[in-house]
Image (cartoon, rainbow, N blue to C red):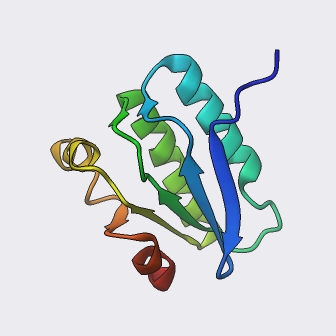
């Protein structure tokens, strides 16, 4: 059975913009499918990876997903690129702040700001 489509990835201003189709990115299956689909969407051309994760509509994320995002940040850093997160709900923003991951990730208010920074 094929995995459910969990993300939508589009090209905008030379960057990959990813939105999520689920409100809850919490259970193991969803996190695994999101991670796999993100990995497949990333360019493999050797150029710096420029990516915006737009979390509009995402209400809850798991610590497991945070781990996957840390790995994504490392991959982006290794390519010389930039990753920005935007449109975080107050609950999701609180998760990043409580875990001190707001220091690791570039978190901005909206998609336009995120694209301007990368």
The answer to whether 27 is drawn above or below residue 66 in the figure is above
Compared to residue 2, the image places residue 99 above or below, namely: below
- Residue 22 in picture, x, y percent from top left: 51, 35
Instruction: Give the residue at x 59% y 73%.
Output: 80
For image coordinates 40% across by 79% down, the residue present is 113
Asked if residue 40 is positioned above or below residue 44 in the image, the reply reads above
* Residue 75, visible in the rendered structure: no
| Above or below, 109 relative to 92 | below
| Image quarter hosting the N terminus | top right
- Say whether residue 98 is visible: yes
Task: Return the residue found at the far top.
Answer: 1
Residue at image position (44%, 74%) is 114
Place of residue 44 in the rendered image (x, y in percent of width and height, measured from the top left): 80, 60
Q: Relative to 10, is 71 on the left or the right?
A: left
- 56 or 38: nearer the viewer: 56
Q: Position of residue 51 (x, y in %)?
A: 58, 65
Taking the image as shown, residue 49 lies to the left or right of residue 112, namely right
Count of marks, rendered view: 0
Q: Residue at x 61, y 37 (%)?
A: 35
Residue 87 is drawn in which quadrant? bottom left
> In the drawing, does residue 44 fall left or right of residue 18?
right
């Amino acid at each position: 059975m094929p995995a459910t489509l969990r993300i939508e990835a589009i090209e905008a201003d030379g960057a990959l913009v990813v939105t999520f189709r689920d409100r809850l990115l919490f259970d193991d299956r969803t996190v695994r499918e999101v991670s796999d689909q993100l990995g497949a969407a990333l360019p493999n051309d050797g150029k710096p990876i420029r990516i915006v994760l737009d979390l509009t509509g995402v209400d809850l994320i798991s610590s497991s997903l945070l781990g996957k995002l840390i790995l994504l940040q490392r991959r982006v850093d290794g390519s010389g690129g930039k990753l920005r997160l935007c449109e975080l709900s107050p609950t999701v923003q609180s998760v990043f702040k409580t875990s001190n991951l707001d220091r690791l990730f570039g978190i901005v208010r909206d998609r336009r700001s995120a694209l301007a920074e990368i």
